[in-house]
Image (spheres, rainbow, N blue to C red):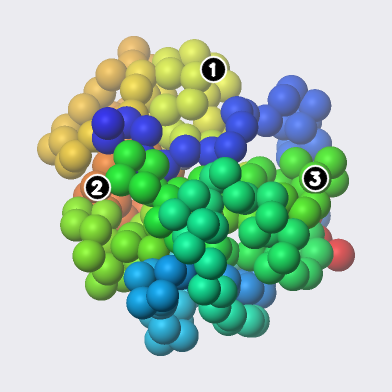
Amino acid sequence: MLADLRRTLTDRFGTSDEHRLDASLRRAGRVNVPVRFHVVHSGGRGRLSKAAARRQIATLNAAYGGRKGGADTRVRFRLAGYDRTDKPSWFHHPRRYEGAMKRRLRKGGRGTLNVFTAAVGTEVLGFATFPHQYKKDPRMDGVTIDYRSLPQGPYKPFNRGYTAVHEIGHWLGLLHTFEGGCLPPGDGVADTPYEAEPAEGCPDYRDTCPQRGDDPVHNFMDYAHDTCMREFTAGQGRRIRAAWAAYRSR
Ligand SMILES: [Zn+2]
C-alpha cells in the first residue's frame, strides 16, 4: 500500500512542543549535521559501499540545499562515520531488533544523525524519530531506511535517495504535508498548502482542501514517488532550524 511507504515511529508534536518551536525561531541559524552511517547486511545482501553512503549524503545536500528545485533550508550534512555489521536477523527485521541494533551501533549525542540501512520492507521504506523524543529516549534516536532506496538502488520508483531525505525531514522536526488533513494547524508550516490525504504516484495537479493553494505533491514530506519529489519550502527550513535550536543544538 503506497500510502504507508514512509512512516514515522510516533505521531505529531504536542501543543507544548509546537510552542517551544515558535519560541526558538529567533535563535535559529545554519545547521551542520554529522552523519554516522551504519550498514546492516546479510552476507552480500545489503552490503552497501562507502561510495553509496557518500552518494546518499550528496543527495541530502542537494535536496536540503534547494538544488532539486525548492528552497535552501540551510541544512548541510557530512559523513562522520561509516561501519558495516553482518547480522541477518537485524537486516531482515530492523523494527523487531531496533533496540538491540541501536544500542550496539548508535554513536554521538542529540546533534548526530545516525542512519541505519537494512531490509525495512516493500510497504514501508523507512522510519524515524522526532527531535522532541530525544530527551526521553536518546538511545533510540535515528533514522532507518531500506537499503534499496539509496541513489541508484534497485527500488524503482523509490531509488533516488529521497526516502532518506523524507525520513531525515522527520528527524529534523518536519511533519507530513498532509498532517491533520484540511484542519489547522496542519503541518505547522505556513507555506505548504493544506492537503486532505497523501499523494500517491505523481499526480499532475491536486487541490483537496478549501484553503488557498494546490496540494504540495512535489514536496519531500508528501508520499509521492521519488521521480515526483523535488522541494522543501522556506517555511520548512525555518521549522527545521527552530527545531534544531530547541532540541538538537549544543
Ligand atoms: Zn513520513
Task: For ligand 1, tell me if the residue under mark 1 lies within 8 Å.
Answer: no
Q: In the rendered view of the protein, which quadrant contains the N terminus?
A: top left
Element at label 3 = loop
Q: Which residue is mark 1?
A: 184
Q: Amino acid at mark 1?
A: Pro
Question: Which of 173 and 139 lies nearest the eye of the viewer?
Answer: 139
Q: Residue furthest bottom?
A: 51
Q: Residue at point 41% right, 83% down?
A: 49
Q: Residue furthest left?
A: 204
Q: Residue at point 52% right, 73% down?
A: 86
* Distance CA(mark 1)–CA(mark 3): 29 Å
Q: Amino acid at mark 3?
A: Asp
* Distance CA(mark 1)–CA(mark 2): 26 Å
Position in image of residue 115 (x %, y %): 57, 64
Q: Which residue is mark 2?
A: 225
Question: Which of 25 and 250 lies nearest the eye of the viewer?
Answer: 250
Position in image of residue 225 (x %, y %): 24, 47
Q: Residue at point 31% right, 55% down?
A: 230
Q: In the rendered view of the protein, which quadrant contains the C terminus?
A: bottom right
Q: Are marks 3 and 2 in contact (CB under 8 Å)?
A: no
Question: Which of 161 and 213 lies nearest the eye of the viewer?
Answer: 161
Of circles 1 and 2, which is in front?
2
Q: Which mark is residue 137?
A: 3
Q: Are marks 1 and 2 in contact (CB under 8 Å)?
A: no
When the figure is inspected, residue 86 is found, relative to residue 195, above or below; the finding is: below
